Every structure is written in C-alpha cells, then in structure tokens.
Amino acid sequence: MKLDPKRHSWMTSPEARAVMAALGEARFVGGAVRNALLGREVTEVDIATPLTPDEVVKRLEDAGLKSVPTGIEHGTITAIAQGKPFEVTTLRRDVETDGRHAVVAFSTDWAEDARRRDFTMNALYASAGGEVFDTVGGIGDLEAGRVRFVGDPVTRIREDYLRILRLFRFHAWYGNGEIDGEALRAAAAEKAGLKGLSGERVQKEILRLLEATDPMTSLRAMAATGILGEVLPGALNLPRLERLIANDTDNFFAPDAVLRLAALLPENDVRTVADKLRLSNQQRDRLVDLCGAREKIVSYLSVKEVRKLLYLVGAARFKDRVFLKWAEDTKASNAIQWRALLALADSWQRPRFPLTGQNVIAAGVPQGPLIGRILSEVEEWWIDSDFIDDEFSLAERLKAVVQATAY
C-alpha cells in the first residue's frame, strides 16, 4: 500500500520536507499514517528514526532547525521547522515497565519498534515518498475497524495501564461493531491497574473518548466490565448521555466532552470527579455550575421567560442547561421546541439596564450602599417587565422604590 504525497499536504509541506531531509533515514509513524489511510484529517506528525537522539539533534542543528529535548530519556526530540513541531523518536524497545513508565533501549530495528507499540493501527510507518510499512497486520485491522493490541494484550496492558482506556477511546474513534474480544477480556482482567494512573492521564483519555461522535459502544462495554466505575464513581446516567449523543447526531451538534461528562455524572459526585480527573478550573466550574443548576428549564418556556433566563445566566450557560434538560426529555416530539430555545439564545443580544447610580442620586438618595440596593430592585422589576424601554415607566418605578425605601 502507498500514500500519494500529492494528496497529503502534511507530507509535502516545506516544514515536513526540511525535517525529513535533515534526518535522512526516517519515516512518518502512528496517527498521521493511520488517519491518512482513512482519509481523515492529520493534525500532528510524528517521525521515527534509527538515529540516536544525539545524532538527531546534531542533524537538525546542521540543517538550521531547532530541537527541543522533550522526552530525551525515551528517545524523543521535538524538531521545530518554521514554528511547526514534529516529534522525532528513536526506534526503541522496552527494557523495563511498571504499568506507568518504561525504561527503553534504542534500536535500529523497525519491526522491533513496531512490536512495542500499543495497537496495530498505530504501528504503521510511511516513507517520505509514501510507501507504507506494516509488520503487525495494522492495515487489515484499520480497514476492518478492529482495534487490536500488538502481540499479547495482557503484556501490552501491563506495560502501561492507560492502554485500557486507550482501547475504548480508539474503538470509539476508529472501531466498527463490537470491541475485540481478546482485548476486552484482557482490559477487564487488568482493570485494577487503573488505580495507579495519574488523574491528568485518565482525564485526557476520558475527555477524548467523550469527544467521539458516538462513544456509547465503548462506554457500555466499560460499564459492563466495571472499568468505567474504576475511573468515574457513583451511579452514572448512561441513558441521559445516550439521549444527549443522539440529539448531537440528529442535529449535527459538535460533540462537547464536558457537557457529555455532566450528562453522565450524578450531581453529588461532580466535585469528586473534577478533583480526581484534575480538570482545569474552567472545566470544573462549568461542570459544577451545570450539575447544580436549579433554574426551571422546560421545552415550552415562553419567549419572555427565555429572555429573563438569558439575562440572568448568560447565553452559554443557558444553552448548557437546555442541552442537558433536552437529554432528560424522552418525548421526541419536543425536539422542535428545544431547538427553538437554542436558536433564541444564539440570536439574543443582552440589553443594557438604562439606569445608573446617578439616576438614583438625582431622585434624592444620598451616596451610600442604598443606591445599589435600589438599583437592584428596579432592575429586578425591569427584567420581570421584559426589559421595558419606556423612560417614563422606568422613572416612575424608580420614584416608587425610592419613596418606599427608608433611609
């Protein structure tokens, strides 16, 4: 099999050509080759070479390219060409593993390097001219949508227990039908090893899994084997998540990993999960806010009620709530109304409250905290009046509030 470089700009870009020319003996490897064979977008380009890391650095520098020792103990150098990074790794074999980290020895054997990789579809190499090299049956597995470990699944998993989660993530993105039986049995048998993984590594896999168009086959298998409970505690709501995913598919909505995580989690376990997965502050705050929301969100909200909620919580938070409540609604005929709520949010422009502290002072209120309380009361009336813009009505309401307030 061969890739046509003319059809793959990532192979022929000036940056890629510069790095490959500098290294001499090198091949593209992994995700770039896999995605190119499937006709999918290539976003990261990794390169393998029999050159030692020291030789890689020397050749890059001789060619006027920058090198960064991002993982030099594992043979990885990041080459920078015109600002674009390429991860260059020396062929290697694992000498010692503990389920999280590996001690490696460098090699010049391409087949040996392929044998230490996780899945056959990730052990594919391509020359600069497009010739594809496959020593583990990766092309056949890729065409069949079969995520299969290279060699013995238990051995591969014990080298790095994160591969359990990667199995389900890769099946969600590249698999067809059921998960490979041998791989699934090995993952279930070795699931206790997940406890030793860092929250950051688990988080990355879970969020990437949830970003797949339809991860439900993987998630159901994870739940059935007890693997999902190892990484996400509590009574998980798979039916709600499944409806959210179906809504995404039916309406061409882009997958949103944090929103999907919110649909999956029980409310009382949100903070625990956020801490366990080491979510960013922004992700954690969004998750906690959404799962703790108490606003009344139903498909038959009036336009006035929608505008009020949009003003109080903002368009993004309102849409989050709509997506989640829609996923709880089992009545398919309500879809039109739910979509209308989202459309209102997208077209909404936040109105500006027309009064300021100067208006309150002009009404006879002295400087002090009372100004803010009066403004808040008038603003609340203004919101309930659907953001009335009649100056006389506003002035009369301000006068009434000032008169009714002792100061």
Image: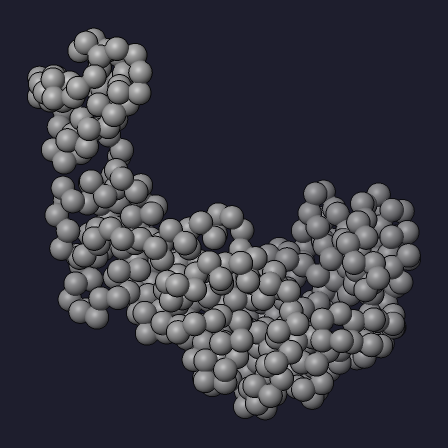
Percent coordinates x, y for residue 145 in the rendering: 52, 80
When the figure is inspected, residue 386 is found, relative to residue 234, above or below; the finding is above
Res 122 quadrant in image: bottom right
Give above or below for 163 relative to 189.
above
What residue is rendered at 22% in x and 66% in y? 329
Which image quadrant for residue 248? bottom left
Where does residue 349 sit, x and y in percent of width and height?
A: 26, 34
Q: How is the image coloured?
A: one colour
Relative image position of residue 273 (x, y in whole percent) = 49, 63
Residue situated furthest front in the rendering: 406
Front residue (pair 331, 406): 406
Res 352 visible: yes
Q: Is 110 situated above or below 349? A: below
Query: Can residue 183 be seen from the camera position used here?
Result: no
Taking the spot 45% from the left edge, 76% from the top edge, the residue there is: 219
Viewed as shown, does residue 87 lie left or right of 379? right
In screen coordinates, is 216 left or right of 14? left
Q: Is residue 391 left or right of residue 67?
A: left
Q: At x 26% / y 19%, what residue is drawn?
A: 371
- Quadrant holding the C terminus: top left
Q: Is residue 398 left or right of residue 343?
A: left
> Which is nearer the eye, 314 or 31?
314
Q: Nearer the viewer, residue 332 or 131?
A: 332
Residue occupying the point 31% across, 60% down: 324
Residue 58: percent from the left, percent from the top?
90, 51
Quadrant where the N terminus is found in the figure: bottom right
